[in-house]
Image: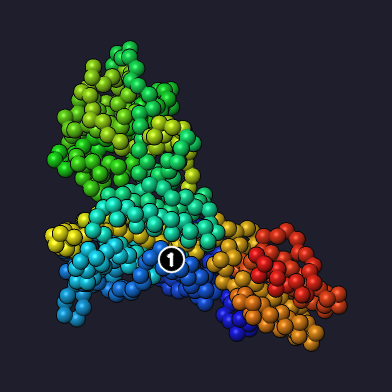
């Protein structure tokens, strides 16, 4: 490609709407342009990156036995009603009507469509296992679209769906997909980690996420120093970190004017947050309000809490009026003593003794509180986030936390969708049974953003070679004036093209400094500088994008510099 015939549009200024570096650099390098909230144009340079990611994903999916198809982006409501997700999915599902008043949605995912295909196409166990995939545009009306294509409303996903006669067969394909994903992220050249995960609205038994490690990642990941345990903090099981001590103090009500938070409480009474109980009132299923109790230094895990049968899903905090009616106070003064609603405590909160909590009276707290003596034993459930230093739930090692960007998610769905949508198959004995299902997604456009988040410097993007928009750039100095430079640059350009290198010839009449800065911002992995002075010595200047210095090489070595890698 010749730069003069391509559309490059870089900017020096950092766009003010972009908070994270990948979004800033994608805008500055001209990879994407915003159309509207959560809607982005993939500009020619950005599309080249996306196509390269897709090619790697497609190759590895095919290698793992996947079969590509393409489903419509618009889906009829009927199949979503069959799976019961028309009601369940909530406002992230963009619903619309056609001219006849029939309901449709823009597909946020394709379980319903593929299950409809499966129930019509698959009849016999002999056709299974089978794994269909597509690379296609999804729409999710995200509550907070942000960070550019990292969390957009429209994005490109690779989604695969497998069908099986037995659970064992599903587990086999789940493992194959796990390995294919590792292969994909290894080939792209990203530092990543697979972790156990919550299944969210997709449903099903077990799921695993793939995260690109980056400090700006939205997800916290817990792993153990003692073994292979790794899980999203949303999912990572918290275990009791000790046992309950003796009840040695008497209960006493103390005035705490203006104290609403654990931080204020621990300062006002000069006690560690670990000695304070945090009581949160949420909407329940049987009881209208349920109390959740945590140790003051711990955080509620909303996903674990809403999975409890006593707690309404999605997790909803009780209104100020509801709090008044069950606790007679404001949110900052609630405590478990004397409550007549169900009380659920985290294991560590249940192990507290002589603790401090709200008195269910504004501006008052109680000290010296002990379970069993002063209030009934709570129901114990895992409702908190694990924190660094916790003992691992596997019993080996301790928990460390890193941040990650979720780029892939694989699920064992089991028979959830096939049961709901009557996708059955005749087994070896001619008996009808529900098909077992798995599903496997990769956020293609998010991978591009995550790669930048992990690979950049103050000059711009440092693309892994596998997905760079161009692998190499030839930057001739003063090509318009020097026939020798022009001839040498054109020759190298032809040689690199012949060697199948994705090369950009920067044939624009620009000053060298401007040209170099732009290619560094775009992040092209290899740069060759052709100049009259160097040509006199039969040389070129070579610089890898992350090299600190350029080196001189003989012209003949140029092609090999790239193809030998
Ligand atoms: P998240 O928790 O980030 O919202 P999710 O669990 O909703 O993700 P899945 O339903 O598992 O995502 O979708 C598969 C993949 O699609 C994700 O792993 C992610 O890479 C990508 N993805 C999901 N939502 C978005 C989005 N709004 N923008 C870009 N990519 C997305
Ligand atoms: Mg989501």
- Specify whether 494 is left or right of 108: right
Q: Residue at x 42, y 25 (%)?
A: 272
Q: Is residue 391 left or right of residue 75?
A: right
Q: Nearer the viewer, residue 382 or 41?
A: 382
Q: Quadrant of the N terminus?
A: bottom right
Residue at disc 1, secondary structure:
helix
Which quadrant is the C terminus positioned in? bottom right
Instruction: Give the left or right position of residue 316, taking residue 40 as reference.
Output: left
Q: Could you classify mark 1 by the number of other residues whose Cα lies within 10 Å: few (under 14), some (14-19), or many (20 or more)?
A: few
Q: What kind of colouring is applied to the model shown?
A: rainbow
Task: Using the image, determine if residue 317 lies above or below residue 89.
Answer: above
- In terms of depth relative to the viewer, which is nearer, 265 or 64? 64
Q: Is 353 placed above or below 28 here?
A: above
Residue at figure coordinates x 16%, y 77% from the top left: 101
Q: Does residue 274 sit above or below 230 in this rendering?
A: above
Q: Is residue 494 left or right of residue 226?
A: right
Q: Position of residue 246 (x, y in %)?
A: 33, 14
Q: Residue 314: x and y, percent? A: 25, 49
Number of labels in the image equals 1
Seen from the viewer's position, the closer of residues 483 and 134 is 134
The residue that mark 1 highlights is 63
Residue 21 in the image, given as x and y percentages of width and height:
54, 59
Residue drawn 18% across the image and 60% down it: 427
Q: Is residue 190 above or below residue 287?
A: below
Please identify the quarter of the rendering in which residue 438 is found. Answer: bottom left
The reply to whether residue 265 is visible in this rendering is no
Q: Residue at point 41% right, 63% down?
A: 64
């Amino acid at each position: 490609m010749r730069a003069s015939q391509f559309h490059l549009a870089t900017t020096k200024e950092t766009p003010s709407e972009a908070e994270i570096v990948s979004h800033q650099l994608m805008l500055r390098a001209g990879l994407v342009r915003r159309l509207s909230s959560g809607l982005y144009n993939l500009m020619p340079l950005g599309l080249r990156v996306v196509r390269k990611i897709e090619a790697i994903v497609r190759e590895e999916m095919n290698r793992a036995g996947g079969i590509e198809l393409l489903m419509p982006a618009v889906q009829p409501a009927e199949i979503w009603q069959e799976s019961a997700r028309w009601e369940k999915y909530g406002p992230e599902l963009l619903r619309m009507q056609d001219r006849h008043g029939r309901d449709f949605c823009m597909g946020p995912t394709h379980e319903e469509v593929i299950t409809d295909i499966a129930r019509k196409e698959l009849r016999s166990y002999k056709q299974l296992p089978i794994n269909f995939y597509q690379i296609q545009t999804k729409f999710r009306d995200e509550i907070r679209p942000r960070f550019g294509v990292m969390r957009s409303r429209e994005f490109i996903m690779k989604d695969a769906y497998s069908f099986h006669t037995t659970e064992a067969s599903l587990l086999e394909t789940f493992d194959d997909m796990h390995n294919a994903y590792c292969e994909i992220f290894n080939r792209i050249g990203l530092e990543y980690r697979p972790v156990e995960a919550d299944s969210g609205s997709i449903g099903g038994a077990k799921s695993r996420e793939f995260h690109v490690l980056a400090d700006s990642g939205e997800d916290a990941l817990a792993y153990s120093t003692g073994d292979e345990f790794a899980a999203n903090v949303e999912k990572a099981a918290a275990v009791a970190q000790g046992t309950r001590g003796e009840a040695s103090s008497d209960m006493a009500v103390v005035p705490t004017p203006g104290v609403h938070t654990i931080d204020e409480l621990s300062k006002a009474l000069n006690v560690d947050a670990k000695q304070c109980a945090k009581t949160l009132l949420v909407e329940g299923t049987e009881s209208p309000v349920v109390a959740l109790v945590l140790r003051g230094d711990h955080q509620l895990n909303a996903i674990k809490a809403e999975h409890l049968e006593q707690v309404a899903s999605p997790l909803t905090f009780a209104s100020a009026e509801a709090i008044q009616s069950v606790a007679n106070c404001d949110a900052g003064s609630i405590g478990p003593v004397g409550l007549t609603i169900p009380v659920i405590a985290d294991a560590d909160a249940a192990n507290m003794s002589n603790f401090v909590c709200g008195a269910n009276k504004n501006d008052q707290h109680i000290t010296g509180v002990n379970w069993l003596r002063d209030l009934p034993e709570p129901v114990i459930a895992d409702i908190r986030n694990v924190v660094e230093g916790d003992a691992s739930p596997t019993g080996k090692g301790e928990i460390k936390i890193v941040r990650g960007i979720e780029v892939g998610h694989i699920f064992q769905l089991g028979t959830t969708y096939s049961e709901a949508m009557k996708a059955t198959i005749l087994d070896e004995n001619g008996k009808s049974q529900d098909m077992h299902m798995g599903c496997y997604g990769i956020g293609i456009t998010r991978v591009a953003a995550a790669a930048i988040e992990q690979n950049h410097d103050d000059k711009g993007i440092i693309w892994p070679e596998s997905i760079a928009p161009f692998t190499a750039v030839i930057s001739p100095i003063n090509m318009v004036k020097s026939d020798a430079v022009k001839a040498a640059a054109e020759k190298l350009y032809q040689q690199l093209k012949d060697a199948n290198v994705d090369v950009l010839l920067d044939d624009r009449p620009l000053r060298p400094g401007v040209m170099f800065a732009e290619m560094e911002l775009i992040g092209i992995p290899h740069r060759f500088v052709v100049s009259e002075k160097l040509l006199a010595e039969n040389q070129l200047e070579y610089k890898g994008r992350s090299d600190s210095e350029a080196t001189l090489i003989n012209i003949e070595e140029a092609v090999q510099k790239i193809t030998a890698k």
